[in-house]
Image: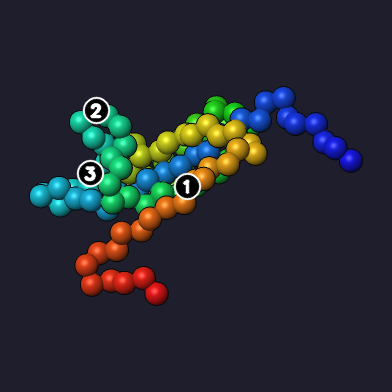
Amino acid sequence: MMTERHSQPEVFVLWHARHLAVEEDGEAIHRDLDGGIHLDEEEWRILGIYSDREMAGARGQGAKQLPGFRDEPDCFCISPLMLDEDLWTDGYFTEYPEGIQED
């Protein structure tokens, strides 16, 4: 039996970045000079996948009160994604720090 594709196959992923990079004063680097989330030495967590941007935003606001997330309240990101769309089609490369080798 064939199924009909959704007429609106877009979903919204709510992410949070925990930043590991620190400045000379020991403070984590959360945002770049242009205001964007700092994208170096961070760990990403998915909080949920939602049918609309408003639901994702509301969840992010609530999460700002939770341990860990409240330490970096400006590091939430909502990404629209299309269902049934391939991502990472070219694979990836891992660069290991000196002295660490892949098994």
Expressed as whole percent of the image width and height from the top left, the position of residue 66 reads 43, 48
Image location (x, y in percent) of residue 69? 39, 47
Answer whether labels 2 and 1 touch (C-beta < 8 Å). Answer: no
Q: Which mark is residue 29?
A: 3
Indicate the secondary structure of the residue bearing disc 3: loop
Residue 82 versus residue 60: which sits nearer the camera? 82
Vertical arrangement, residue 52 with respect to residue 2, above or below? above
Disc 1 on helix, strand or loop? loop
Tell me which residue sits at (60%, 38%) in the image.
85
- Tell me the crowding category of disc 3: few under 14, some 14 to 19, or many 20 or more residues within 10 angstroms, Cα based: some
Viewer-nearest of labels 1 and 3? 1
Residue at horizontal 46 percent and vertical 42 percent from the top: 15
Q: Mark 3 or mark 2, which has the lower sequence index?
A: 3
**Residue occupying the far left of the picture:** 24
Q: How many marks?
A: 3
For the point 15% across and 52% down, the residue is: 26
Whole-angstrom CA distance, mark 1 to mark 3, is: 30 Å
Question: Foreground: 28 or 44?
Answer: 44
Relative to residue 25, is residue 5 depicted above or below? above
Name the residue at 19% across, 50% down: 22
Give the class, few, some or many, for how many residues have Cα within 10 Å of label 1's Cα (few <14, many ≥20): few
- Where residue 34 is drawn, which disc sits there? 2
As drawn, the label of residue 27 is: none
> Can see residue 80?
yes
Gap in Å between the C-alphas at discs 3 and 2? 13 Å
Choose mark 2 or mark 1, whichever is in front: 1
The image shows residue 16, relative to residue 100, as above or below, that is: above
Q: Which residue is mark 1?
A: 90
Amino acid at pointer 2:
Asp
Q: Is residue 56 left or right of residue 98?
A: right
Q: Nearer the viewer, residue 55 or 93?
A: 93
Q: Which amino acid type is marked by label 1?
A: Asp
